[in-house]
Structure formats: C-alpha cells, structure tokens
Image (spheres, rainbow, N blue to C red):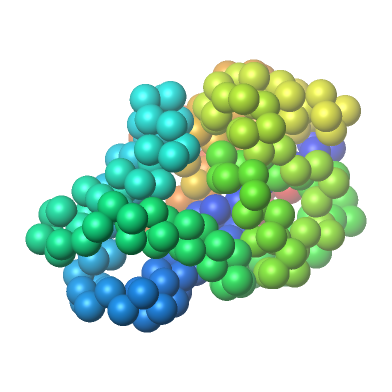
C-alpha cells in the first residue's frame, strides 16, 4: 500500500534540541548567576540526560525525577555546590525557556513543503506536553501537522505500541500506509515497526547502523529518495 501518512518525531529530528537546549541553559545560568563554565556543565549533562530519558521511557523514573535528578547528578559530578531549591528553579526555568528558541535542522521547511502537498503529516513525541506545541509555534512549523500526539496524552511512551496505535487511530490512518521518521532506533523506528508501520531512521550523527529492516538518512532532504 502506498504511504498516505507521515509521522515525525520532533526533538532531534526536526527541532534542533541540542542547540536550543544549550541556549536555554545559557539563559538560565545567566539569570541565576551560576558561575560554572557552561561547556563543562553540558559535557557532563548531555550523556546523563540521555541516561535519564532512557529510564523515563522505561518507566523507571517519573517526569519530576527526570527533571531534578539529571541536574543534581550533573552538579554533583562537576563538584558545584548548589541547593535543592535552586536546582528546582533551574529545572522549571529551563523548561520555560526551552521553547523560546527556534533552531531547526537544515532543510526542515524545504522537506515539509515538499511532503505537505503529497501526504498528511503528524507528530509523535515523547517530549513534555506543555512545551512541544510551543516549540512548533516558535519555530513556525505547527501548521504543517494535522495530528500531534505526545506520550503524556497517551499515558505511555514510545516505543510502547499503544502510542503508535493511538496516533494511527487519531489520524484515521492505516499502519501499512504510514511511516515514522525519527532519530531514535529504539523509540521511533522499532516502535513503529512493531505495529506494522514503515520507518526511516534520522541518523544525523552518522552512526553505524546494522539493520536491514529500515532505511537511514543523514539529511532531511534524503527523505525525497523514499517519499
């Protein structure tokens, strides 16, 4: 069956999370007079953040624990003394500031313009409910998408099949006529394949991938080869 519906992940796929996140932390640190070198902080924070997001997907930590512990663990690792109250303030302000920045991956508008006339476009994201729409509004891509599904609205997270089945039902889409495009092999690609959707891996880091069940792209423009 020909593809009719294209589902995108948001962070790390269309919206440049790393660049926007760095800018949000700079804004918070400047406001709160955090004297640690930002680059040194981020070097430790980024791998820890990935670990906590994996635990969050696996239901091993709550949303609140994720927000606090990823910061607490980083400040402890770089030996920066900071109160729990200030960590809570930073956690809140970081989330509030994050959607203020609007950097997208190269060719985002070009590929969305190309696809919009051919397919129905949707978002499936594990990101927090309260900021994902704001991110898309600020970066001026919200109007491209018909359906936006967050894991919080479903009650489980990608790669849980319930998220994808919920999105398919909401979009009135058939799995075999739908494709998921995302950066995470575990959350996006394998999750989509598990419910009979097709998938494309957004491999912008150009990591080695040993799998023949899906295609990988290193630029958003590469989507034109498949759609």
Q: Position of residue 70 (x, y in %)?
A: 31, 48
Q: Which residue is painted at 39% across and 41% down in the image?
A: 66
Q: Visible in this render: residue 218?
A: no
Between 58 and 110, which is closer to the camera in this rendering? 58
User: With respect to residue 55, does 68 lie above or below?
Assistant: below
Q: Which residue is painted at 22% across and 48% down in the image?
A: 73
Between 89 and 13, which is closer to the camera in this rendering? 89
Give the left or right position of residue 194, taking residue 32 as reference: right
In the figure, residue 127 lies in which quadrant? top right
Q: Which residue is painted at 60% across and 71% down in the image?
A: 100
Between 113 and 47, which is closer to the camera in this rendering? 47
Q: Which residue is painted at 37% across and 80% down in the image?
A: 30
Give the left or right position of residue 45, taking residue 191 as reference: left
Q: How many marks?
A: 0
Between 75 and 132, which is closer to the camera in this rendering? 75
User: With respect to residue 35, does 10 lie above or below?
Assistant: above
Give the left or right position of residue 49, taking residue 187 as reference: left
User: With respect to residue 29, does 143 lie above or below?
Assistant: above
Q: Position of residue 143 (x, y in %)?
A: 84, 59
Q: Furthest residue to the left?
A: 79
Q: Position of residue 149 (x, y in %)?
A: 71, 38
Quarter of the image with the N terminus is top right
Q: Visible in this render: residue 145?
A: yes
Q: Position of residue 227 (x, y in %)?
A: 73, 48
């Amino acid at each position: 069956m020909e593809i009719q519906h294209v589902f995108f992940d948001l962070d790390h796929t269309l919206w440049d999370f790393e660049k926007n996140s760095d800018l949000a932390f700079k804004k918070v640190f400047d406001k709160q007079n955090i004297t640690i070198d930002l680059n040194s902080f981020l070097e430790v924070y980024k791998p820890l953040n990935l670990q906590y997001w994996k635990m969050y997907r696996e239901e091993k930590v709550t949303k609140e624990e994720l927000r606090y512990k990823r910061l607490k663990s980083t400040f402890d690792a770089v030996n920066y003394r900071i109160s729990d109250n200030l960590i809570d303030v930073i956690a809140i302000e970081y989330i509030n500031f994050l959607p203020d920045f609007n950097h997208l991956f190269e060719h985002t508008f070009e590929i969305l313009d190309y696809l919009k006339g051919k397919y129905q476009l949707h978002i499936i994201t594990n990101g927090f409910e309260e900021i994902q729409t704001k991110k898309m509004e600020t970066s001026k891509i919200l109007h491209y998408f018909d359906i936006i599904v967050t894991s919080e609205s479903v009650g489980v997270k990608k790669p849980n099949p319930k998220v994808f089945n919920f999105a398919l039902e909401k979009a009135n889409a058939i799995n075999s006529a739908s494709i998921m495009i995302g950066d995470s092999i575990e959350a996006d690609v394998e999750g989509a394949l598990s419910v009979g959707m097709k998938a494309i891996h957004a491999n912008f880091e150009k990591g080695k991938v040993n799998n023949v069940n899906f295609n990988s792209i290193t630029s958003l423009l590469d989507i034109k080869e498949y759609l």
